[in-house]
Structures are given as C-alpha cells and as structure tokens.
Image (tube, grey):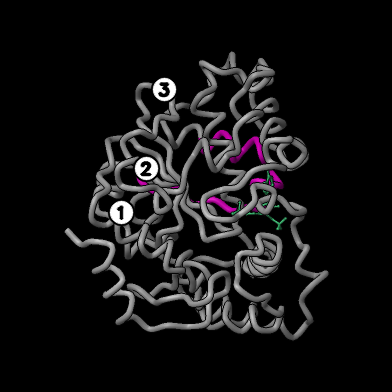
Amino acid sequence: MMTYSSTQDLISTLPREEGMHSAYSYQYQGFWYSPLRLQGLIDCQQHFQARTDDIFVVTSPKSGTTWLKSILFALINRETCSPQDPHHPLLKIPPHQLVPFLELLKPSDYDSVSNSSDSSITRIFGSHIPTVSLPESIMEKGKIVYLCRDIKNTFVSLFHFIKKANIRPSPISLDNAFDLFCRGASISGPVWDHILGYWKESLERPNKVMFMRYEEMTDEPHVQLRRLAHFIGKPFSQEEENSGLLDQIIKLCSFDSMSKLEVNNSGKLIGKIRNDSFFRSGVVGDWKNYLTEEMASKLDRITEEKFCGSGLSMT
Ligand code: A3P
C-alpha cells in the first residue's frame, strides 16, 4: 500500500506547473491536480471499491456539479423526502456535504457514505476524476452521470471561483488563468479531454454513462429530469408527473432557492473553500461580460479542434 510519504515521492517526479487554485499543480495520467486532489485520487485508485448501483456525478469543475448533486439527491430520495418538505435535507445541509466528492474523502470514510434512501441505489458520490484515472470498479458496478458546460462559461466560472474561494497563495490575473486553462493546466484539465473521455464512454456504454449539458438543464429542465430519472432506474410514475413533483424538484434545486439558503451562505467545504463560492450567477452566456473577442475565439478554436470528428459540438 502506498503511504502518504510515497505519494509525495511520486508527486515529486511529476511535471509541475503554476497552479490555478494552489501554488502548484501536477500532471498525472495526462491531467492536472492540486496536491490535495492528487492525494485523494491516488487513494481512490488504491482503496475505493464501488458497489453495485453506486451513482457518480462526474464533472469538470464549474460545470454545474452543485446543481446536479442537488437534483440527484432530491430525485433519489423523493419517496422518503418530499421536495416540499420544510425539513428537506437540501434546505439544511450543503449539497457537497450530502453528496461528497470521492477524492476529498479519506479511504476510511468511503463506507460511511449513506445518502440514498432507495434500496436499489447504494451511494451517491461526486467526482472530477477523468475516465483514464477512474478506479475500475466504478465503470464495472456503478452508473455515471456526466455533466459538461459551454467551455467559455466554464472558464469564467472557474476564474471567479478561484477569486472568491481565495485559496491560492496569491491572486491570479484573468490573463494568467486563461493561459493556464488553454494549455490544459486547470483543475482536472485539460477540460476538453475530460469531456471527450466521458462523451466517448456515453456512446459506447449508454447504460453506464449518461452525458448531460448545463445549458440543456437550463433550457429544458423537465426533459432532462425525466432522462435522469430513467437512467438511474427510477422513472417518474404518471401519478408523480401529475402531482407536480418535477416542478417541485426543479424549484427546490434552482439557483434562486439554493443560493439564498443560509446553509449555502455559511461554513466551508473541506480545506478553506467557503460554501458560498459554489454560487455566483448561474447565468448562461455570462462569459460575454468577461472575455474579449479574441479570448472567446481562441477557446472556440481549441474546442473545435479538440472535438473534431467526435460527433460532439460545443461552439
Ligand atoms: P457561475 O459561476 O457561472 O454562476 P460547480 O457546481 O461545478 O462548482 O459549478 C458552479 C457553477 O454552477 C456556478 O456558475 C454556479 O453559480 C452554478 N450553480 C450553482 N448552483 C446552481 C443551481 N442550483 N442552478 C444553476 N446553476 C448553479
């Protein structure tokens, strides 16, 4: 078993870059991580065993993880907890605590995750791990819901998150962050490779990996909620459809309601990241307020080049 000090030894051999949200980031299996995330990832690779029907919410950071975690939690637990219940856990506990990030858990805590009241679904985890580094048991036994977002919005959201979370030793400029992002050295980047990995898996194993987009969740939440419910094996009954349950889940998990809750405006996630860092504007197309035309075209150009021939289009 690799100990913490030997992971440190491994880290010292890896390519290193200036970090976007930590002093340095390290390249491991083709993707970039802060030391904390990398330690967590290596722990997962060595110790995590998925159980049949565990569900994984996987994203590249700032693609809407918080939103999707909330929706899945509400969806899976809807029989024991009505989204209209004034004591619903989502009103009292931050989404990232209800649905923890796998790679931020200690191995001794994997088994204590218990966030599904549905006997056919074991546990719900979040993760930013790319396909190439996923522990094998996840693909074998679990189901993955992958959410991506327009790359320009993802970058702008990431830049603001880094500023708001204030976890970097010194502030980073927009230009510097943009350069690191374009070169792939962002958190769990390159974002394009991250997305492509799950896109291809969703085509090859549609029963295992479902591919979603933030913008589609915004435009057609009912359609996406039905897709999600069907994918996890809990489709809505006619009675649930008629009762307005979909509207209730959408409302409970909406940016407006989640971002105003006291619980999401206080406290911190692991490390020093404040819970309110995960809520900013939730607006599609907000990149126009921050990126120059040149920056936007550069991101579009990289996206087109990277996705060329994959059948995936995001520009
Ligand atoms: P913006 O910075 O564009 O506002 P993640 O959850 O992956 O960290 O992504 C954070 C982004 O999702 C932020 O985007 C945040 O505002 C937005 N977000 C958080 N909760 C949301 C919700 N309930 N509905 C829609 N967007 C949400």
Q: Which residues are magenta?
A: 208-228
Work out whether 3 lies above or below 26. above
Q: In this rendering, would 301 be left or right of 76?
A: right
* Pick the front one: 223 or 257: 257
Corner quadrant of residue 8: bottom left
Q: In this rendering, would 117 be left or right of 220?
A: left
* 3 and 1 marks in contact (CB < 8 Å): no
What amino acid is found at the position of numbered circle 2 in the picture? Lys
Image point 69% across, 18% down: which residue?
A: 86
* Pick the front one: 63 or 211: 63
Picture disc at residue 143: 2
Q: How many marks?
A: 3
| SS for callout 3 | loop
Spatial separation of the CA atoms under disc 2 and disc 3: 15 Å
Q: Position of residue 226 (x, y in %)?
A: 56, 33
Q: Is mark 3 within 8 Å of ligand 1?
A: no
Picture disc at residue 118: 3
| SS for callout 1 | helix
Residue 227 is one of the magenta-drawn residues: yes
Mark 2 or mark 3: name the one nearer the start of the chain. Answer: 3
Work out whether 193 lies above or below 110. below
Mark 1 or mark 2: name the one nearer the start of the chain. Answer: 1
What amino acid is found at the position of numbered circle 1 in the picture? Cys
Spatial separation of the CA atoms under disc 1 and disc 2: 17 Å
Tell me the residue that label 1 is attached to: 44
What amino acid is found at the position of numbered circle 3 in the picture? Asp
